[in-house]
């Protein structure tokens, strides 16, 4: 592996670890939470509302509360990690990041599902999807 690419990878991994530790210390230990700008300005829950509470619940191994906070994000965590690892490995081998047509279609479907999830969680009939 080329030294420059390895250095970039180590910096990226270090930045992600630093952000995770910072997130854990500031948000989870102090109870501080970032308000959702979309919710604050419109009163509408976005597809990402509840993610902070979801991660907080996951750190406590409280999967029920995590699911109640944001089931959409909870379901996507593992596939997203797998996809990122796969693409990261491909990047390290070739130095290029390429998406196949099927990967682009899957990403488009996930984005469409996020919009549908956002709409549904704001309807009274689907209030169970709203973050708790």
Image: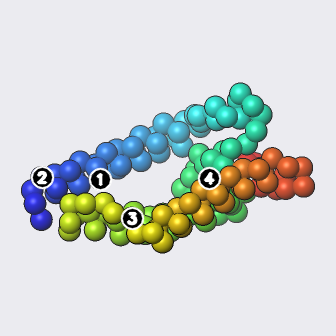
Please say if 130 is above or below 39.
below
Residue depicted at 35% across the width and 50% down the height = 17
Name the residue at 23% across, 48% down.
11
Residue 97 sits above or below residue 42 on the image: below
Disc 4 packing (10 Å; few <14; some 14–19; many ≥20): many
Marks 3 and 2 close (CB-CB < 8 Å)? no
Please state if 2 lies on the left or on the right of 97 as rendered.
left
Give coordinates of residue 50: x percent, y percent: 66, 47
Give the mark, 3 or 1, whose residue is nearer the N terminus.
Answer: 1
Q: Measured from the top left, where is residue 16 in percent x and y?
A: 35, 49
Q: Nearer the viewer, residue 26 or 126?
A: 126
Element carrying mark 1: helix
Q: Are marks 4 and 2 in contact (CB under 8 Å)?
A: no
Relative to 106, 40 lies left or right: right
Q: Which mark is residue 54?
A: 4
Q: Quadrant of the N terminus?
A: bottom left
Q: Marks 2 and 1: which is nearer the front?
A: 2
| Residue 132 as seen in the image, left or right of residue 66 | right
Mark 1 sits on what residue?
13
Q: Secondary structure at mark 4?
A: helix
Mark 2 lies on residue: 4
- In space, the residues marked 1 and 4 are separated at their CA atoms by 23 Å
> Mark 3 or mark 4: which comes first in sequence?
4
Q: Quadrant of residue 38?
A: top right
Residue position marked by numbered label 3 in the rendering:
99
**Alpha-carbon distance for marks 3 and 4?**
29 Å
| Residue 56 can be seen in this image | yes
Q: Distance between the Cα atoms at labels 3 and 2?
A: 23 Å
Name the residue at 89% across, 49% down: 124
Residue sitting farthest toward the right: 125
Q: Is label 3 or label 4 in front?
A: 3
**Is 124 on the left-hand or right-hand side of 7?**
right
């Amino acid at each position: 592996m080329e030294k420059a690419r390895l250095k970039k990878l180590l910096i990226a991994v270090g930045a992600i670890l630093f952000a995770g530790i910072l997130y854990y210390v500031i948000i989870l230990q102090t109870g501080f939470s970032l308000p959702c700008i979309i919710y604050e300005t419109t009163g509408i829950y976005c597809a990402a509302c509840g993610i902070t509470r979801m991660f907080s619940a996951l750190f406590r191994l409280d999967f029920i509360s995590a699911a109640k906070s944001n089931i959409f994000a909870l379901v996507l965590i593992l596939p997203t990690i797998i996809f990122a690892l796969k693409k990261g490995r491909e990047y390290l081998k070739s130095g290029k990041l390429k998406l196949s047509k099927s990967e682009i279609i899957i990403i488009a479907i996930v984005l469409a599902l996020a919009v549908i999830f956002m709409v549904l969680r704001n309807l009274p009939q689907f209030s169970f999807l709203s973050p708790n």
